[in-house]
Image (spheres, helix red, strand yellow):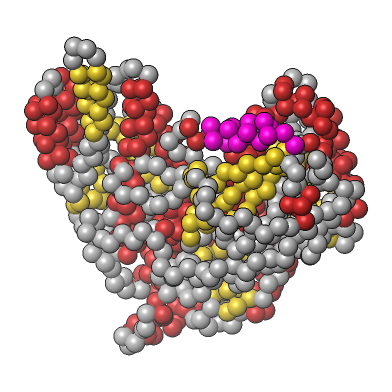
Amino acid sequence: MNPSPRSALRLLFSSLLLPWLLLGLAACSRQPDAPKPTEQPGGSSAPSQSAEVQAAEESSIQVTGSQSRPQASSFDLYSLSLKGLQAKLETCQRDDSCTGQDLELGKLKRLLGYVVDEQRGDVLLLGVDDPQWPAVLVEDFVIALRNAWGRYDEVKGNVRHYSYPGCDIRPNSEVIDKLDALMDQLNTSSSAGAVRKVISAWRRTCMVPQQVSVHGVPFDTHFGKVMVEADYDMKSLTDGTDDPGVPGFTSLASIRRDRHQQAFARGQTPALQGGMNRYWLSPGEYNYIEADGIVLIKQASVRVQTNPTTVDDSGEIVDTASSDPLAERWVASFSILYDKIAARRPIYRELDNLFRAFALAKILRFRKGVEAAGLDLTYFLDDFPIVGEEVPREVDGRPTVDHIERILENEESIQTTRLWMPGCGGVGMEIEPEDKDFEVVPQLVDLRDQVLAETVPAPEPTLVPKAPPVTVLAQNQRLQQINKNNHPLVVTLVDADSQVQLFDGLTRTSYPRLDAPQILSQVTELLSKKGASTVYVELEDFPADEQENFIRTSESQIAESHPDVLFRPIPGIADELMEQALFGPGIELSEPDPGAEPPPERQDDVRLQDWSRGTVQFLSFVQDRLATITITAFARDQAVVDAFLAKVEARFSDAPMLPESVIQIIDQARRELMAEETYRDYLREQGREGELRIRAESDLGGRHFVDVGTSSRLRAA
C-alpha cells in the first residue's frame, strides 16, 4: 500500500461570500389565510467549477492556483442621502406622483450603517445590494425612526411610556383553564371513546380565536403585518403542521413524539404533561464599529427564546420559573438554522429587514447622528403619510394533536397505550444599544471619506467602490457567520506584504511576518472565549515553504502548550459554495446513491487507490438548493474506516434533529476515534502515513478533494 504524502490538513475554500448577519427585534403571528411560500423564488445559477487542486508532493503542501479569496460581486456597497430622499418624497407625495420604487430604499437591501455629512447637513445610509433579499420600504424605516424618536410613546399624565416594536398573540385565560381541565380528563380516560371525546373538545377549544396585539408601532402597517405573519408561520413550524424543508430542522412536536417513542422502546409509558410555552424572537449578540462620523453594524444575530407560562390568580398569562428542556433545545436549533429557514421562507427575511431598520434607527438616535449632521427630519418624523396594511385583530388558535400507539402483545391480551400531545403558544421582543456595544475602529475614517467623496445628494443610491475597510468588514462577517454556528473556531491568516493579518470574525490584527508565538497566543485566547478545542486556520497568499514552516511550528507549540487543542491548517481554494456546504449548519444523513457513477480519477485517487475506503452522504440546504455532500474516508485498514463512519452515523441516532455542520460531525468523529486505544496503537505502527484521510465532495458545482483534518499527534490516554 502507498502512504499518502499529505499529513497536514487540506481544506478547500470558496470565493468570498458576504453573509450579512441578523439583528433581532420581534416576531409575531401571521394571519391564517396568508400565503406561505415554501421556497424563495428565483435563485442563483449553478456555480462554476474551480480549478482542480492537485495533490502535493510528500515534502510539501503546495496547492495550485491562487490562494487569494476574491471579493464577491454581491458585496456592492451603496450610500443613500436621507436629505435627498426626504426632499423627493415630500414633493412626489404632495403631488401624488411617487412610484413604487420611490418608496423603497433601492439597492440598500441589507442596511449596514450610516455616515454623517456635516458639510451638506446630511446623513448617508449605507447598505449592500443582495439580490436574494427583498427591498426595504421607506415606510418601514420611517416607522422605525418614529419609534426610536419616541413618536409612538404613550403619555399618561406627566409620564411617557415607551414600547419596543413587537406584538403578541395569546389565548385568553378561560381557554387555558379549559385546556388544563381537558388534559386532566385525558390522563384519566380509560376507553377509546372517552379519549376521542376529549380530543374533539380540545380541538374546538384550542381553535377559539386568539387576540393579536401590536405595540410600539401603528397596528395596521406593513411593519406590523410582517411581524404577525412571521410568528404565525413560526407557530406552524413549532407544532409540526408545516415543514420548511431544511435539513437538521425538526418541529417541537416531533421532538416530543420521538422522546415518547424512545420511552416506549424502553418499556416505559410516559406521562402526559400539561402546561404551555411562550416562544418569541429576540436579539442575540449585536454590536457596532465606529469612527468619527461613521457607524456600522458589526455583529448581529437573532435567536428564538421560550419560557413555560401559567395563569396567575388575576387571570393573566405569566412566565414561570420552571424550564422545558425539549423546548429549549428546539429554540436553540431554530436560532442556529434561522438563516436557512429564512432562505426558504421570505417572510423571515422581511422580518430581518425590519430588525436592521430598527437597529439603524436606534443607533442613529443613540449616537446623535442626525444632530451631528444638522439634518432636519421633520417630514419623516411627523409628516410622512403611512399608507398601512390591514392586520387581523385575532387569528384562529392552532390545535395540535399527535397520536402515538404502543401495542404490547402476550398470551392473554393486547394492551394499547395512546398518547396525545396538544399545544398552543405566544411571542414578544425588545432591543437597545449601549455604549459597551460600540468599538472604535480608526480605519473606518478611510471608508467615511470615500463615501463622502462618492455620494451625491440625490434620492437614488450611489455605488461606493470597494475600499480596504469594506473588505476587512466582509472578511470578518464571513467568519462571524461560520463561527456562530460551528463549535470549532475558524480564523484566517493573510500574507500582506511585510505583515500577517489575522481575522477572527470580529477584528483584524497585524503581526510581524509569521510570528507564530503571538499569533497562537491570540488563537488560543479566542478558543478559550468560544469554549472550543479545535481551530481551523485558513492560510491565504503564503508561499508553500512558509506555509509548511508555520504549520510545523504551530503544531509543535500548540501540542506543547495546549495538548487538548487540535490545530488544523487549511490552505487552498475551492468551489465558491464548498465553504457553505461544509460549515453551514443543518444536515441530514442520507443513503448513498448505489446507481451513481464514480467520480473521475484524479491524482489524489491514484495515490489512495490501494487504501480501504467507505462513504457517507449528507443533505444540506445551501443558498437556494438542496445539496448532496459525500464524505469518503480513506485508511490503510478497513477497520479504521468502518469505525469512523460508525461514529458519524451514531451522531444521528442520538437525536431526532442535528443542526450541526459537516465539519462538526467529522471533527467529533475524529476526536472519538483518537480517544480509542486501538486507533492510537494503529497510528503508532503506521505513523502519519497511515492516518485517516477524508475527502468531501459536493454536487453544487463539481467534485473537489478536501482533507478536512488530521489528528496525527498522539496524546496520553
Residue drawn at point x = 44 percent, y = 70 percent: 42
- In the displayed structure, would residue 9 be above or below residue 139? above
Q: Quadrant of residue 292?
A: bottom right
- In the displayed structure, would residue 665 be above or below residue 601? above
- In the displayed structure, would residue 109 be above or below residue 580? below
> Where is residue 635 shown, x and y percent of the image?
72, 38
Residue 206 lies in the magenta-colored region: no
> Where is residue 568 shown, x and y percent of the image?
75, 42
Residue drawn at point x = 41 percent, y = 64 percent: 40
Quadrant containing the C terminus in the rendered view: top right
Answer yes or no: is residue 9 visible. Answer: yes
Q: Quadrant of residue 73?
A: bottom right
> Where is residue 573 shown, x and y percent of the image?
72, 59
> Where is residue 599 shown, x and y percent of the image?
64, 57
**Span colored in magenta:** 636-650
Observer-nearest residue: 183 or 426?
Answer: 183
Residue drawn at point x = 37 percent, y = 28 percent: 259
